[in-house]
Image: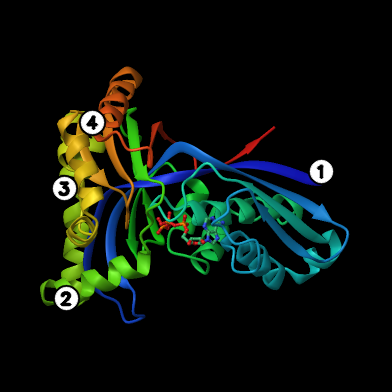
Amino acid sequence: MRLYSLLAAAKINLYLEIMGHRRDGFHELVMVMQSVDLADRVTVRSLPSSEIRVQCDHPLVPQDATNLAHRAAALMAAKYPQAHHHHGGVEISIEKQIPVGAGLAGGSANAAAVLVGLDMLWQLGLTQGELQTLGAELGSDVPFCIGGGTAIATGRGEQLDSLPSPPNLYAVLGKYQSLSVSTPWAYGTYRQQFEATYLQGDEAHSRRRQALHSGPMVSAIAHQDSPALGKALYNDLEKVVLPAHPAVADLKAAMVAAGGLGTLMSGSGPTVFTLTTTREAAETIQEQVRDRLADPDLALWVTRFSSTGVQLTA
Ligand code: ATP
């Protein structure tokens, strides 16, 4: 087969704690990641030439070598030059559903899909672990986006421990379409404001990681306890993004007022989500928030927790 069509799922962060500095300049994180069924379609097609081409239907997404999907293909070509030579280049088409710069790992999901797609197109037979190691070279969220589901992510976010299936929840996502938040800005601002509170030393970091493993979020997931999961939602980056973007704080307040199990900003934002146990409850919250804020720039989606990251489709 010379073409594969894949769905690349977005993620939300159910928990995001910044523990401190890493020697490589990134932050040491402890997170709980969850895939949702909002997904981009990524198609990889063999080309007779050795070229790597990207096309995308979203105006804010670059179509050149800076696209993370292009970088994923270039990495595969550099690691597996014989397969590249033998099977030829690749044309990557991305149909965007995941909003851009939203804290939902859209670019990382696209890169993950290209790794999985090229593994099949070039008949490499790589394991998920090998694909995740490659993904970590592209970005911290890429390894999670390959397998998806529910996982604890530590280090820069690239070290994964899978978790048991959480309760089957719905997430109403809300994002102002004209607003995006730069991930480096969010972490850089957090550092400026909270560096004095950072944990020092590997041992302190290791204790916090253990605390998450035995803490309320992981326990709520393991016991499929939806109300407890809603209460355990946490994201350190809200402390810098919400004050800088009052519209996001107002969106969060409107979602909290609409009810649900719990409300949180995902990743570095600006997407905010509310969890519910049924689709009907999610749709009611979607309508209430839309009516209350009455802003045509606000986009809202009803999504469901998903157990997959990249998925092959017909
Ligand atoms: P994260 O949650 O991992 O921080 P994000 O959802 O905030 O990611 P993305 O949507 O992945 O952010 O995009 C961030 C930037 O990356 C955008 O400014 C965009 O121009 C660039 N980019 C490069 N490749 C892609 C891609 N394939 N899809 C989306 N954005 C891309």
Q: Secondary structure at mark 3?
A: loop
Of marks 3 and 2, the one in the foreground: 2
Q: Which amino acid type is marked by label 3? A: Gly
Q: Residue at x 81, y 43 (%)?
A: 1
Pinpoint residue 240: horizontal percent, then vertical percent.
Answer: 20, 62
Q: Secondary structure at mark 1?
A: loop
Q: Which residue is mark 2?
A: 195
Dot 4 beta carbon under 8 Å from ligand 1: no
Residue receiving disc 4: 292
Where residue 8 appears, x then y in whole percent?
55, 44
- State the separation of the CA atoms marked 2 and 1: 52 Å
Q: Nearer the viewer, mark 1 or mark 4?
A: 4
Q: Nearer the viewer, residue 309 or 282?
A: 282
The CA distance from mark 3 to mark 2 is: 24 Å
Q: Single out the residue that lies furthest toward the left.
A: 197
Query: Reading the chain from its start, which is encountered first: label 3 or label 2?
Result: 2
Q: Position of residue 195 (x, y in %)?
A: 16, 76
Q: Determine the CA span between mark 2 and mark 4.
A: 37 Å
Residue 302: where, in percent of width, then height?
39, 30
Residue position for label 1 = 1
First in sequence: mark 4 or mark 3?
3
Q: Considering the image in quadrants, where does the C terminus appear?
A: top right
**Residue, x 22% and y 74% (percent of image)?**
191
- Viewer-side residue, 5 vs 270: 270
Residue for badge 3: 215
Left or right? Give the position of 180 relative to 212: right
